[in-house]
Image: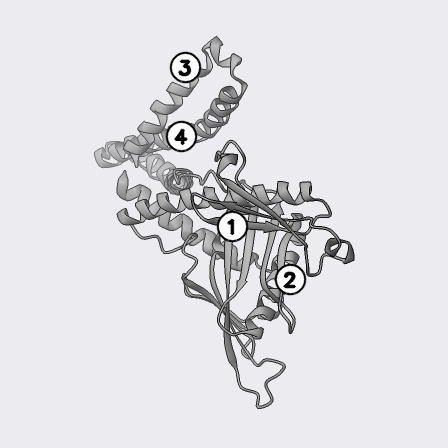
Amino acid sequence: MEAKLEQVRERFEEVTAAMSDPAVYDDPDRYTELTKEHSDLKVLVELYDEWKDIRNRIEGNEELIEDGEDAEITAMAREENEELKPRVEELEEDIKFKLIPKDPDDSKNVIVELRAGTGGDEAAIFVGDLFDMYRRYSDQLGWSLNLLSLNESNKGGYKELTFGLEGKEVYGKMKYESGVHRVQRVPETETQGRVHTSAATVAVLPEAEEVDIEVNTADLRIDTFRASGAGGQHVNKTDSAIRITHEPTGVVVECQQERSQHQNKEKAMKMLRSKLYEQEEEKLRKERDKERKSQISTGDRSAKIRTYNFPQSRLTDHRINLTLYNLESIMKGDLDEVIEALRVQDNLDKLNAVMEEG
């Protein structure tokens, strides 16, 4: 850990020197970036200095205790060490977690795609339930939700549904939702009371800005079509819906919820940039995963991550073996306990990786 902290100190000194160069003020973006990094590193360097100082005092006291020449001084040294050792442990824990590399995407807004999987009509209904759960969760956190596109099922629910979430640290919380969500319950149409199993897929994409990924307009095919679904009567009267195909990758996005082509095109481009950005991030994740396999997956959408068992009011997150028996409140948006448990485990995994590397 000490070697890693010495690297942090070196970087802190480099950033401090860079900030003292008058030329940096001519580049506001660079100055902002350096200021933020300097602020983050300063906290860690100060903790490191305090940790080293207290460790040196403990070592000095240990030498006095070992000598034992003066009973009064020995007793004082023991007493001081009893006070200092818990503080060293606190500092070590604090420092370790501050050494965990931050995910630069955590502060981004997100685009969430929900798709019905196995289970037919019941899977589509479950997509609607998941959407309602995320809507209520976002309300609790003060996020804003924007519906982007939907494809309704004949018997209720949605075959597909895409929405955006905007607010503070949205991706940092929602990224743990990517994967296959399985539901076990008795459908309303089931006459014999048998429990059916259905599934829905959730994909959470960090919203990419133009600076994150460049899209060549020559690579795009843009089609208009008449919107359908729960957008209101007005959406069916004109070809306001937009479908954009990124021909080099085959990625297709649609947006039909706004009244004008212009608004739908703007939102569809956001969706497209986010999908292309996610593809690039997925490549990087796979390269990193060759080195080590994280217990918490935020990218593999084929992995079954969670089961919602309604007869037992049970939610199980299979990645961390978490089981809770308050499914009703979770479906009403009380997701904090689940997401916090995933975040803690993710940080522990990252911390172990940092310690192994350092």
> Looking at the picture, does residue 112 appear above or below residue 273?
below
Using the image as rendered, state which of residue 76 and residue 265 is in the foreground.
Answer: 265
Q: Residue furthest bottom?
A: 192
Marks 4 and 3: which is nearer the front? 3
Tell me what residue is drawn at x 47 percent, y 38 percent: 104
Determine the CA span between mark 4 and mark 3. 23 Å
Of badges 1 and 2, the one in the foreground is 1
Answer few, some or many: residues within 10 Å of disc 1's Cα (few below 14, many 20 plus, some between 14 and 19).
some
Give how far across and how far down residue 317 sits, in percent: 46, 64
Residue that mark 4 sits on: 50
Residue that badge 2 annotates: 132
Q: Nearer the viewer, residue 324 or 306?
A: 306
Say what secondary structure mark 3 lies in.
Answer: helix
Judging from the image, what secondary structure is the residue with disc 1 in? strand
- Marks 3/2: CA distance? 51 Å
Q: Quadrant of residue 235?
A: bottom right
Residue 17's tag is 3
Q: CA distance from mark 2 to mark 4?
A: 48 Å
Q: Nearer the viewer, mark 3 or mark 2?
A: 2
Q: CA distance from mark 4 to mark 1?
A: 54 Å
CA neighbours of label 4 inside 10 A, class few (<14), some (14 to 19), many (20+)? some
> Which amino acid does the dot numbered 3 rest on?
Ala
In-image side of 176 versus 74 (left or right): right
Is the residue under label 4 in contact with that under label 2 (CB below 8 Å)? no
The image's mark for residue 252 is 1
User: Quick check: marks 3 and 2 in contact, CB under 8 Å?
Assistant: no
| Residue at the outermost top position | 22
Where is residue 263, by image quadrant? top right
